[in-house]
Image: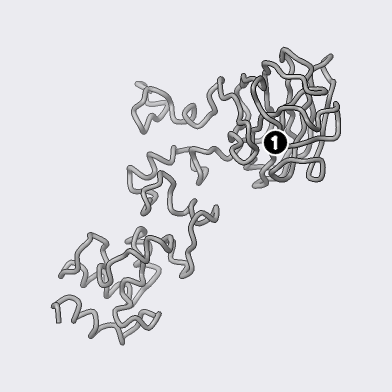
Amino acid sequence: MSDGRAADCNQNGIPDECDLLPAPDTPGEDACADAEAVGPGVTLHGTSVGATNDGSATCGLSGASPDVWYSYTPTGSGFASFSLAGSAFDTVLSVHSGCPGTASDQVVCNDDYYGTQSALSLFVQAGRTYWIRISGKDGATGAFQFTLIGPAALSAGDCNNNAVPDECDIASGFSPDCNANGVPDECDIAGGESLDTDNDGVPDECAAAALLGDLNCDGVVNVFDIDPFVLALTDSSAYQATFPGCSIMNADANGDGSVNVFDIDPFVALLTGG
């Protein structure tokens, strides 16, 4: 980093590309719904001891076995390989197209590949999420070692896949985070966490809380909103590009659901307190 070859936007002493990799001790999650997002590049260690049963599979008598979960969302299509070689018990490995992962949405399952350890390969499609279930034969549990080789993955810490941690996108102003949840607005909208009914790039919960007439989104309505109002009125695309964290509907001063010349007089009234 000191030689400039690796960025460290959050100044934590770790190159950004490594921040976006899961830690080697990422143990997986007991519930499919909480599956830890992973990608290729590291070997993960965890244990199924103490886990509960949250899914099922068709091989290795593992339908009722305790299980832990990871998720994998590749950014490109291609073959991916999953391995539990080096684990300390008789493992079963399955990949599912849905969550909870059950026999009905199982894509592939393997019991014994490297002796009693499991491994499998499949063709994965870009943008599709795969849920990985690690369990044991006939109820077996123990410490596991999990390796994934395949296309790069969409990182949980880089939702827009620009190789910059989300926290840095937000801190730099590159990505607005209007609801302060640590996730860029664009990802809240794309992931369905927030609605954007007017397609202005601003989550509805933030637009609803916006101040009518505050076109530069500084929290007050004053003369500094005049030029942004004119821009919103005359060139909506330029307005959104100039003020990406603001809702253009702040210019809908007469509340008729559209921004047009009929908003001019009501905007002046907001500006002057009339």
Dot 1 surroundings within 10 Å: few (below 14), some, or many (20 or more)? many
Judging from the image, what secondary structure is the residue with disc 1 in?
loop
Q: Quickly name the residue at label 1.
A: 54
Q: Nearer the viewer, residue 244 or 220?
A: 220
Q: Nearer the viewer, residue 245 or 57?
A: 57
Residue at 36%, 70% in the rendered image:
248
Residue 187 lies left or right of residue 79; in this view the side is: left
The relative height of residue 93 versus residue 274 in the rendered view (above or below) is above
Screen quadrant of the C terminus: bottom left
Residue 215 is situated, as x and y percent measured from the top left of the image, at 27, 68
The relative height of residue 126 versus residue 64 in the rendered view (above or below) is below
Residue at 79%, 25% in the rendered image:
92
Residue at 37%, 65% in the rendered image:
207
Residue 173 lies left or right of residue 196; in this view the side is: left
The relative height of residue 232 versus residue 71 in the rendered view (above or below) is below
Residue 108 is situated, as x and y percent measured from the top left of the image, at 82, 36
- Occupied quadrant, residue 96: top right
Residue at 27%, 67% in the rendered image:
211
- Occupied quadrant, residue 204: bottom left
Residue 172 is situated, as x and y percent measured from the top left of the image, at 33, 44
Check disc 1 and give the amino acid type. Answer: Asp
Residue 211 lies left or right of residue 38; in this view the side is: left
